[in-house]
Image (spheres, rainbow, N blue to C red):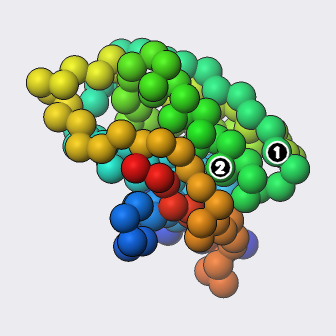
Amino acid sequence: MKNKSITPRWEHFEHEADIGIRGIAPTLEQAFEQAAIAMTATVTHLDSVSTSKVISIYCEAPDTELLLVSWLNELIYEMSAQGVLFNRFEVVIDDDTLSAMAYGEAVDRQKHHPAVEIKGATFTELRVYQQADDTWVAQCVIDV
């Protein structure tokens, strides 16, 4: 039984020179969304990012842990290639396939004051699992 009283959330965790990100939510999809939000929060304050631009993301991997890394790296690619920051996501996971809509806007250095540049999601501390209370956790360390 899903614990619907759990509010999806994200958090950072300590990891030497890099940054750990973690999404925690009632569903796997929401945990992936929260991990992506945690990643954006390493760059800028989330409330400074509007949702004027929408980008479709699609990726696949043989398991959920590799799918998380693929998802985050696709977002990092889009952030770099298109010069955007995201603050909202709608993720659908079907077996080993993820499709999503990422909402954000073009980077404005005066408005967003980017703190770090994310190089990539890593396999360090990579875990995707369901806790005893049925909430999902999706986490890894990002290289900054």
Q: Residue at position x 23%, y 43% from top? A: 115
Classify residue 78 as left or right of residue 60.
left
Do the CB atoms of the residues marked 1 and 2 lie less than 8 Å apart?
yes
Q: Residue at position x 54%, y 19% from top? A: 55
How many C-alpha atoms fall within 10 Å of the one at disc 2: few (<14), some, or many (≥20)?
A: many
User: What's the amino acid at mark 2?
Assistant: Val
Q: Is residue 42 above or below residue 73?
A: below
Q: Quadrant of residue 96?
A: top right
Q: Is residue 42 above or below residue 71?
A: below
Q: Secondary structure at mark 1?
A: loop
User: What's the amino acid at mark 1?
Assistant: Ala
Judge whether residue 108 can be spotted in this image.
yes
Q: Residue at position x 45%, y 16% from top? A: 82
Classify residue 88 as left or right of residue 98.
left
- Please name the residue that numbered disc 1 is placed on: 61
Between 142 and 36, the one nearer to me in the picture = 142
Q: For the residues marked 1 and 2, what is the alpha-carbon distance in whole angstroms? A: 9 Å
How many C-alpha atoms fall within 10 Å of the one at disc 1: few (<14), some, or many (≥20)?
A: some
**Looking at the rendered structure, which numbered label has been put on residue 69?**
2
> Which percent across, then down, holds residue 99?
71, 32
Q: Quadrant of residue 92?
A: top right
Q: Quadrant of the N terminus?
A: bottom right
Which one is earlier in the sequence, the residue at label 1 or at label 2? Answer: 1
Between 102 and 60, the one nearer to me in the picture = 60
